[in-house]
Image (cartoon, rainbow, N blue to C red):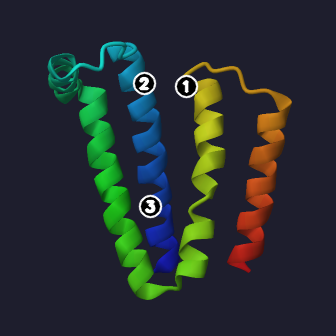
Amino acid sequence: MKWLIVGVMVAATTAGEVLQAYGMRRHGEIRDFRPGALGRALALMARNRYVIASVVSMAVSFFALMKLLSVTELSFAVPVSAVTYVLETVLAKYVLKERVNRLRWAGAALVICGVALVSL
């Protein structure tokens, strides 16, 4: 049961982060931080379907984490959730078309090693 919850949490977090990045790229950079401009930016983001889907995904992730914490220890739940970093790196490369250098791939490999150690 705990691995199913981990899977849901990891999938929802990964989807949420990628959707957020994509949605904000479609929105564009926020350059004006005056209250009125921030309000307009928030209104635009509230209509951005990718940002909305990101918020929903992150909510699913949050509640999956709460459920996971009710069935296992924090010292397991938090480190095992780090696998999202690896999945997000892969999706950044192939879905968002980002350039991922060797150092970032090495970091992702180290994260996988850490997750493997914690899950034993």
**Image location of residue 48, percent across then percent down:** 23, 24
**Amino acid type, residue under disc 1 in the picture:** Val
Q: Which mark is residue 22?
A: 2
**Image location of residue 88, percent across then percent down:** 58, 40
**Amino acid type, residue under disc 3 in the picture:** Met
Q: CA distance from mark 1 to mark 2?
A: 9 Å
Q: Residue at x 36, y 24 (%)?
A: 23
How many other residues sit within 10 Å of disc 3, few (<14), some (14-19) or many (≥20)? many
Q: Left or right: 97 with respect to 27?
A: right
Contact (CB < 8 A) between labels 2 and 3? Answer: no
Contact (CB < 8 A) between labels 1 and 2? Answer: yes
Q: Left or right: 62 with respect to 44?
A: right
Q: Is residue 83 above or below residue 44?
A: below
Q: Residue at x 42, y 24 (%)?
A: 22
Q: Which mark is residue 9?
A: 3
> The C terminus lies in which quarter of the figure?
bottom right
Q: Identify the residue position indicated by label 1 in the image.
A: 95
How many other residues sit within 10 Å of disc 1, few (<14), some (14-19) or many (≥20)? few
